[in-house]
Image (cartoon, helix red, strand yellow):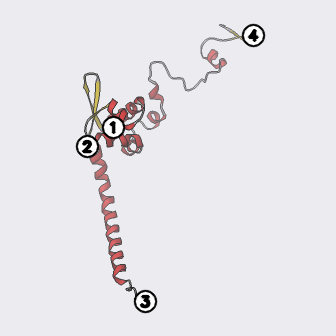
């Protein structure tokens, strides 16, 4: 028995933490990084391309990198986001191979990788063809309506 709390003896170890009001689960071992316990890494270890692109800030980062390679500080200034947030999104983009990083002295410079975006483009191609057919049919329909429309009559004075 270790300490007394409200006149009761307390146990050492997990019991002491439970009595002190700490949660028993989940308890992360000290040797495993906290990010390993996120729900994303447990249930879905590899986010899909669309999950990565679904985040508006990540799309803004990709848009900024269209102009050319950028250092993290430049992205922070451009996007007006906190540096830890930009770094977190850059790490996700780097892990998914959307961006490359190179070290220049004390700066990390990120550049856009086109391969994952080309894969998305290839996936979208059949859908573009379907929409193009529909839009062509709509255009023909509107042109037919324009030709079939009666001409306005002039009012007699």
Reading the image, the residue beneath label 3 is 155
Q: What residue sits right under mark 1 in the picture? A: 96
How far from the left and from the top, in percent, is residue 85?
A: 42, 32
Q: Quadrant of the N terminus?
A: top right
Q: Quadrant of residue 89?
A: top left
Give x and y (percent) for residue 23: 61, 24
Q: Residue sitting at 26 percent across and 40 percent down? A: 113
Mark 3 lies on a secondary structure that is loop
* Badge 2 element: loop
Name the residue beneath numbered marker 4: 7
Label 1: which secondary element: loop
Q: Is residue 107 above or below residue 54?
A: above
Task: Measure how far apart labels 3 and 4 are at the Cα level.
Answer: 102 Å
- Characterize the local packing of mark 3: few (<14), some (14-19) or many (20 or more) Cα atoms within 10 angstroms: few
Q: Is residue 69 left or right of residue 16?
A: left
Between disc 4 and disc 1, whose residue precedes?
4
């Amino acid at each position: 028995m270790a300490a007394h709390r409200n006149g009761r003896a307390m146990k050492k170890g997990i019991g002491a933490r439970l009595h002190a009001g700490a949660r028993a689960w989940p308890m992360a071992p000290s040797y495993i990084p906290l990010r390993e316990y996120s729900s994303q890494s447990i249930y879905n270890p590899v986010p899909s391309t669309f999950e990565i692109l679904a985040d508006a800030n990540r799309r803004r980062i990709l848009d900024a990198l269209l102009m050319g390679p950028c250092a993290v500080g430049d992205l922070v200034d451009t996007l007006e986001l906190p540096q830890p947030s930009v770094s977190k999104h850059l790490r996700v983009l780097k892990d998914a191979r959307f961006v490359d990083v190179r070290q220049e002295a004390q700066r990390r410079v990120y550049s856009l990788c086109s391969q994952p975006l080309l894969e998305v483009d290839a996936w979208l191609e059949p859908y573009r063809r379907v929409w193009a057919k529909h839009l062509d049919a709509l255009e023909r329909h509107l042109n037919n309506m324009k030709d079939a429309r009666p001409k306005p009559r002039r009012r007699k004075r």
